[in-house]
Amino acid sequence: MNKITKQLENLYSWTKFYQDRGNKEAIRKCQTEIAQLKQAFNQLKSNKNGKK
C-alpha cells in the first residue's frame, strides 16, 4: 500500500506540473493512472479489512 501511496503522490505532483503548463493530454493521462491506482488501493484496503 505504501508503494501505491508514493505513486499517487508522484502522479498528483505531475498533474499539478502539467496544469501549470496547460498540457491537457498529459493531465488526462495522469488522471487515468490516478483513478486506476485509487481503485487498486481501495481494493487492497477492502481485502485487508475483510480478512480481520
Image: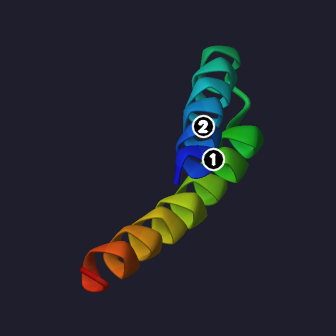
Q: In this rendering, would 20 be left or right of 51?
A: right
Q: Quadrant of the C terminus?
A: bottom left
Q: In this orientation, which residue lies closer to the viewer: 36 or 48?
A: 48
Q: Position of residue 12 (x, y in %)?
A: 56, 33
The amino acid pointed to by label 2 is: Lys
Q: Position of residue 11 (x, y in %)?
A: 64, 37
Q: Quadrant of residue 32?
A: bottom right
Q: Dot 2, how many residues are within 10 Å of its Cα: few (below 14), some (14-19), or many (20+)?
A: few
Check contact, mark 1 vs mark 2: CB within 8 A.
Answer: yes
Q: On residue 3, which mark appears?
A: 1
Circle 2 residue: 6
Label 1, label 2: how far apart the Cα atoms are: 5 Å
Q: In this orientation, which residue lies closer to the viewer: 24 or 12?
A: 12
Give the residue at x 60% y 37%.
6
Q: Judging from the image, what secondary structure is the residue with disc 1 in?
A: helix
Give the residue at x 31% y 84%.
51
The amino acid pointed to by label 1 is: Lys
Q: Position of residue 28 (x, y in %)?
A: 65, 49
Q: In this rendering, would 23 be left or right of 6?
A: right
Q: In this orientation, which residue lies closer to the viewer: 14 or 46?
A: 46
Coloring basis for residues: rainbow
Q: On residue 22, which mark appears?
A: none
Q: Quadrant of residue 10?
A: top right
Q: In this rendering, would 50 be left or right of 33?
A: left
Q: In this rendering, would 50 be left or right of 5?
A: left
Give the residue at x 62% y 15%.
20
